[in-house]
Amino acid sequence: GDLAGDPQPVYTIEEYDKFDLSKFDIEKLKKEFKEKKHKHIAFTDLRELLQHKLKQMLAGNRTYVHFVIRYEQIIDSYNSDSISLQEALEGLGDILGDMSQAEEERVSMGMTPEQKEIFDLLKKESLTKEEQKRVEKAAIELFDYLDGEKGHVLVVDWHKSRQTRDVVKTAIVKALSEHLPESYGRAEFTEKTDVVFQRIRERAEEGDRMERA
């Protein structure tokens, strides 16, 4: 469909799911915005697409919450008449463009959303290219230590018992100690290990809630 379109909604939920952000042409979309007569329809379509893709991306990677904050700021500004419809359209277009770039980066790194989230949690300022490669490897390899060739510690309900939680924490420490660069000092290493453990635990708890729902 033509996103910035005609007087009918252009995308169904199924099409939102198939919409591949990593291959998205934001410049083409912005050009369409300028040419469209029905800017309110374009705004509604774009807002719905963004809501759907933000929910999808956030489920895979919590560090993308900054996109949600930007989205909410634009919607609030538009609703309070602080910005025009055209400015709101351009602002939402910019967010979609940045989300597209983030997805393109993830795909080019060869990472699943879950691996990219771990990478985003592990990375820090001023990494050399070589160090960044090692952090990427740490993010990818971690899952082998948790539920792959190097270990199967994510047993059913592991997060409910202290003993199995400790086993998972130990596996995370082992994986990260083998792969993170030496520039991560002891305090930084401990902090990163804790953050990654908490996120893996949250995922298990979220899985529980979804099963109960």
Image: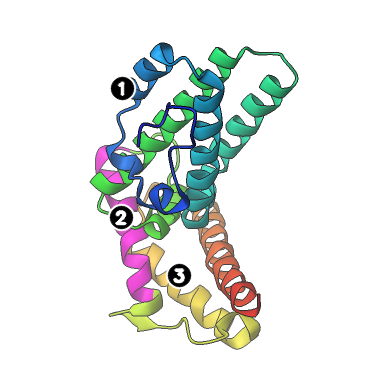
> Is residue 31 within the magenta segment?
no
Specify few, some or many for label 1: CA neighbours under 10 Å numbering under 14, 14-19, or 20 or more.
few
**Is 77 placed left or right of 159 in the picture?**
right
Q: Amino acid at mark 3?
A: Ile
Q: Quadrant of residue 198?
A: bottom right
Q: Amino acid at mark 2?
A: Met
Q: Give the residue drawn at x 32%, y 73%.
A: 144
Q: Residue furthest right?
A: 80
Residue that badge 1 annotates: 28
**Is 131 placed left or right of 36 in the picture?**
left
Residue that badge 3 annotates: 172
Looking at the rendering, the stretch of residues picked out in magenta corresponds to: 128-145
Q: Is residue 163 above or below residue 207?
A: below
Q: Give the residue drawn at x 58%, y 85%.
A: 157
Asked whether 66 or 3 is in front, the reply is 3
For marks 1 and 2, give the CA distance: 27 Å
Of marks 1 and 3, which one's residue comes earlier in the chain?
1
SS at badge 1: helix
Q: Which mark is residue 202?
A: none
Asked whether 4 or 175 is in front, the reply is 4
Mark yes or no: residue 13 visible: yes
**Is 142 placed left or right of 9 in the picture?**
left
Q: Is residue 160 above or below residue 87?
A: below
Asked whether 115 or 17 is in front, the reply is 17
x then y, percent, for residue 29: 36, 24
